[in-house]
Amino acid sequence: MTKFIFVTGGVVSGLGKGITAASLGRLLKCRGLKVASQKLDPYMNVDPGTMSPFQHGEVFVTDDGAETGLDLGHYERFIDENLNQYSNLTSGRVYWDVLNRERRGEYLGQTVQIIPHVTNAIKDFILKNAEVTGADVSIVEIGGTIGDIESQPFLEAIRQLMIEVGRRNCLSIHVCLVPYISGSDEYKSKPTQHSVKELMAVGIHPDIIVTRCDEPVPEDIRKKISLFCNVGEDCVIDNETLPSLYEVPLMLHRQHMDDVVCRELGIENKQINLKEWEKMVDNIHARQGEVQIALVGKYVKLHDSYLSIIEALNHASFIAGKKVVIKWVDSDSVTEQTAPEIFGDCAGIILPGGFGSRGIEGMINSCKYARTHKLPYFGICLGMQIAVIEFARNVLGYSDANSREFDEVCAHPVIDLMKDQEGVIMGGTMRLGKYPCQIKKGTLLEQAYNANIIEERHRHRYEFNNDFRAEMESKGLVISGTSPDGKLVEAVELSAKENPFYVGVQFHPEFKSRPNNAGKLFVQFVKACIVK
């Protein structure tokens, strides 16, 4: 039977519930357990697919095409497991499901209520994820903070589930802030005490309290929390601020958190193997020097909009041996005149995904600068489409070349909708999730992947227009990746003679990059930047 760990947070948001849950997942996996992760988000959107990146950060996409919150990216990177459509649940999705079931008459005329219908739907979802993954342990994070109105149905659902599956099969972890008051040189436990009181008021007693802090919490404060929150002293675990997120599992292990979890859940305390993770952390600390890479995007004011890109660059740096410093460049700021000044101190340019027409001309100027100055360039999704548009304008001579997404009446739509995508509404993105890619021999793509067929995740509607394919190839654009049937262009590049690394891919390789298994294209790109 699957064991469940429920992770809640209190006092303020942004305490690192997701990192705590992901780090614990890594520790349990290193003990030989099969771990599943799940995030319950209280917002009313059905999924984050239509939410502004400035508000929500990036949309993380799973193999099976679920559009999810960025926390799922942390889970995948830490536990190194591919998550699925049952890994993320929002209030909007719950109510959507309940109301549709009511319309279909599945409740047989009952009065539909929060309890039991909404809470039952939440419980069913939690159990379904455990079932489809076959997990020994399912770690479930509840978004928001204790006291939020919108979180109450989720809390009530897990309270019920803990009774139904048996307390011995469930564990509650509560992440709380322990602030340091510099004026009095004191750590304060009251916020944690009040947060735990709120949690207990809804019928959930925490088994483990994780204290979020910048420095280790003094022993007297830990004992105070233990006493007044009714948990064992070894069940008060510090989650202090560290130079790298990937050090957190080791820090929690030093405090025996995984031992405590196994003890409380009655799990055989198998010997843990952290050698691979420890080696990866050693590589982080062994990096010498820096390489600066420009990230040109529309949403650079909120770095979380590109979280998986940031992490993938970091993963590559662990292998390349130099720390990657990102120069954040708003695409609106790039003109042909400003480009030399903006990119003059950069070793490469990465252009990630995005939607809408804002900042497109700046992206095209960035791409042109990289191509004409032999600066390593890595275009992802929109970044690949920009590379195609720039090539059509400045190599083929089609000055009006564009994507139909940005100019519906342009004479040279080198990026266009495929016939089967016409009429798809917002929130129903056609190409979503894992798709195969056939790699052309002798290309940078083949050099990076060392494979003929790969599978990567997508999130887009517009595609390379095959009407221009032969002409572009004749002028030097290499089609290095296609769908297995050859109909869809998945990757383009320039020869190594033209540029040491100039690659655009329609897919999102950042979603599958792991700290202990860095995305292969990112490694090649960073290495090319270092050589540059």
Image (spheres, grey):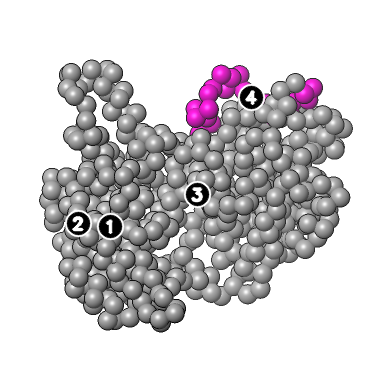
At which x and y percent is residue 503? Answer: 69, 46
- Nearer-N-terminus badge (3/4): 4
The residue that mark 2 highlights is: 200
The residue that mark 1 highlights is: 33
Residue located at (54% from left, 36% from top): 459
Q: Nearer the viewer, residue 445 or 5?
A: 5
Q: Are marks 4 and 2 in contact (CB under 8 Å)?
A: no
Q: Is residue 320 above or below residue 39?
A: below
The residue that mark 3 highlights is: 512
- Nearer-N-terminus badge (3/1): 1
Looking at the rendered image, the disc whose residue lies closer to the viewer, 1 or 2, is 2
Question: What segment is highlighted magenta in the picture?
Answer: 410-432
Three-letter amino acid code of the residue under disc 2: Met
Q: Is residue 367 left or right of residue 200?
A: right
Three-letter amino acid code of the residue under disc 1: Leu
Q: Nearer the viewer, residue 33 or 162?
A: 162
